[in-house]
Structure formats: structure tokens, C-alpha cells
Amino acid sequence: MVMYYWILPFILFISGMMVFVSSQKHLLSMLLSLEFIVLSLFLFLMMYLSLLDNEVYFSMIFLTFCVCEGVLGLSILILLVRSCGNDYFQSINVL
């Protein structure tokens, strides 16, 4: 029964990676799949730290970095929508 609890974050991580690889058209869908991957890693981290009875302050640091990553992605999304009008990767002109 305990093994099933450890397989759940792994399945969540793999499904998040499959969505991230398969949806490369819109920036918003890629950001959502990245946040899903981060949440699965956070679930794995909390399970691992509770097993070892270590401090959970590291999880707060992890959540802080995850929030910073999410804000950075949303700011890039807003910049892209304001400059190009949509969030397609095809509309980005490098020059």
C-alpha cells in the first residue's frame, strides 16, 4: 500500500512532462504544464521529508522559488501578448 503513494508523484510528473512536450503551440499551456510538474515535485518532496522526519523549511524555500518562476513566466506571457497580440510561438520574430 505504501508503494502506491510513492508512484503517484512519479505518474503526475510523467504526465506533466508529456503535456509539456506535446503542447508547444501556446505559451500559456506550457506554463500550466510546468506548474503541474512543480506541484508533483513538491508532493514528492513533502512525502520524502515526512518520511525522514527532517525540517520542512526546505519546502517553503522550494515554494518560494516556484512562485518566482511562475511570476516570471506570467510576465513573459503578458509581454508577449502585449507585443504580438497572442501567445503563439509562431508569431515571435527573433529579428
Image (tube, grey):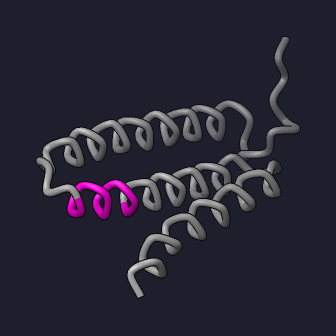
Q: Residue at x 74, y 60 (%)?
A: 18
Towards the viewer: 84 or 9:
9
Q: Residue at x 68, y 55 (%)?
A: 17
Vertical arrangement, residue 93 with respect to residue 28, above or below? above
7 lies left or right of 42: right
Location of residue 88 in the rendering, given as x and y in whole percent from the top left corner: 79, 45
Location of residue 22 in the rendering, given as x and y in whole percent from the top left corner: 82, 57
The quarter of the picture where the C terminus appears is: top right
Towards the viewer: 70 or 63:
63
Q: Residue at x 58, y 32 (%)?
A: 79
Vertical arrangement, residue 79 with respect to residue 59, above or below? above
- How many numbered discs? 0
Q: Quadrant of residue 44?
A: bottom left
Which residue reaches farthest top?
A: 95
Q: Residue at x 47, y 61 (%)?
A: 40
Q: Quadrant of residue 58?
A: top left
First to last magenta residue range: 43-51
Vertical arrangement, residue 5 with respect to residue 83, above or below? below
Location of residue 75 in the rendering, given as x and y in whole percent from the top left corner: 49, 35
86 lies left or right of 54: right
Location of residue 61 in the rendering, given as x and y in whole percent from the top left corner: 23, 39
Vertical arrangement, residue 79 with respect to residue 86, above or below? above
Towards the viewer: 62 or 84:
62
